Image (cartoon, rainbow, N blue to C red):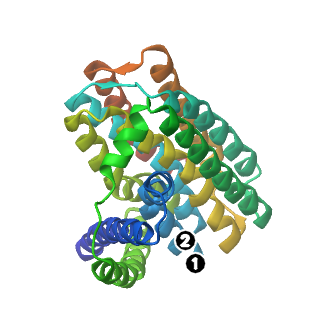
Amino acid sequence: MLLATALLIIGLLLVVYSADRLVFAASILCRALGIPPLIIGMTVVSIGTSLPEIITSVAASLHGQLDLAIGTAIGSNITNILLILGVAALLHPFTVHSDILRRELPLTLVASLLAGVVLYDGQLTPVDGIFLLLLAVLWLVFIVKIARLAERQGNDSLTREQLAELPREGSVSVACLWLGVALIIMPMATRMVVDNATVVANFFAISELTIGLTVIAIGTGLPELATAIAGARKGEDDIAIGNLIGSNIFNIAIVLGLPALIAPGSFNPMAFTRDYGVMVLVSALFALICWRRKQIERGIGGLLFGGFIIWLAMLYWLSPLLTG
C-alpha cells in the first residue's frame, strides 16, 4: 500500500512535469514556425494548463476507468476554485482588472450547465464527446478573437500578462529534445497514476470516482496552483484568474469530452446527483465574487479554503454511506 501511494505521488509529479515541458517545447516551436505570440498564449498555453487532467483522463478511459476520468474533471473544477484560488488569495489578495475575464466568466457557468446536460442520464456517449469537443473549439475561437481585439486596443491587462509569461526565443533543437522527453515520460507517468490510484481506492474501499475527485484532481492541479501563487506574488492577478477560468472550461469540454469518445458507457450516478451540483454551486460563487466585488481578499480566500476542507471531509464521510 505504501509503495502504491508513493508511486501514485511520483506519477502525478511526473505528469505535471512532462506537461510543463511539453507546453514549453510547443511554445518555442510555434514561435519558430512564425505563429503570433498572442495565439500561442491563448491556445497552446491555455490548453497546457489543463494538460495533466487531460492526459490522466485519457489514460483512465483507455483502461476502462470512466469514473476516474469523470471524477478528475469535476474534482479539478472544484479544486481550482476552493483550494487553488483560496490558497493564492490567502497569500495575496486578487483584483480583477481585465475586461476579457468579465466576458469569460459567464461562459464558465454556461459550460457547467452544459456539463449537466451530458451527465444527467448517467451515460457518456460519442455524441456527448463530439458536443463537448466542439465547445472547446468554440471557446478557443472566442478567446483568440477577444484577445486580438484587446491587443489592438492595447488596454487589457490579461493580454499583456500572458504575452509576458511566454518563453522567450529558444533553441529549436532543445525544444525538440524536451518534446521527445515529455512524450516518453507522459504515458509511463499516467499509467503509474491510473494503476496505483486503483490500488489505493481498493485498499481504502472507496470508489474510483472519489479518488478522481480528490487525489487526482489535487495532484493534476499543481500547475494551476503554481501559476496562481506566482501570479499573486508578481501582481499578475488577471493571468492567475484567467488560467483558472480557462482550465475549468477545458476540464468540462476536453477532460469530459475525450473519455466520451474513447470509452463511452455508464458511470457512477453520484457524479451527477452529488458532485455535479457542488461544481455548479462553486462556479456560481466564483463568478459572483468576481462580478460583485472585483477583489478576492484574504478573508474570502480563507472561506474558499475552508469550504474545500469541509467538502473533502464530507465527501469521504458520505462516500461509504452513499456508495460513491
Q: Amino acid at mark 1?
A: Leu
Q: Position of residue 26 (x, y in %)?
A: 41, 70
Q: Going by the image, does 153 lie left or right of 139?
A: left
Q: Is residue 298 visible?
A: yes
Q: Position of residue 214 (x, y in %)?
A: 41, 52
Q: Going by the image, does 264 lie left or right of 291?
A: right
Quadrant of the rendering where the N terminus is positioned: bottom left
* Mark 1 secondary-structure assignment: helix
**Whether residue 27 is situated above or below residue 310 in the rendered picture:** below
Whether the residues at callouts 2 and 1 have beta carbons within 8 Å, the answer is yes
**Whether residue 52 is situated above or below residue 223 in the rendered picture:** below
* Mark 2 secondary-structure assignment: helix
Q: Amino acid at mark 2?
A: Val
Q: Could you tell me how many numbered marks the image carries?
A: 2
Report the residue marked by disc 2: 58
Q: CA distance from mark 2 to mark 1?
A: 6 Å
Q: Residues within 10 Å of mark 2 (few under 14, many from 20)?
A: many
Nearest to the observer: residue 270 or residue 102: 102
In percent of the image, x 50 and y 25: which residue is there? 285
Report the residue marked by disc 1: 62
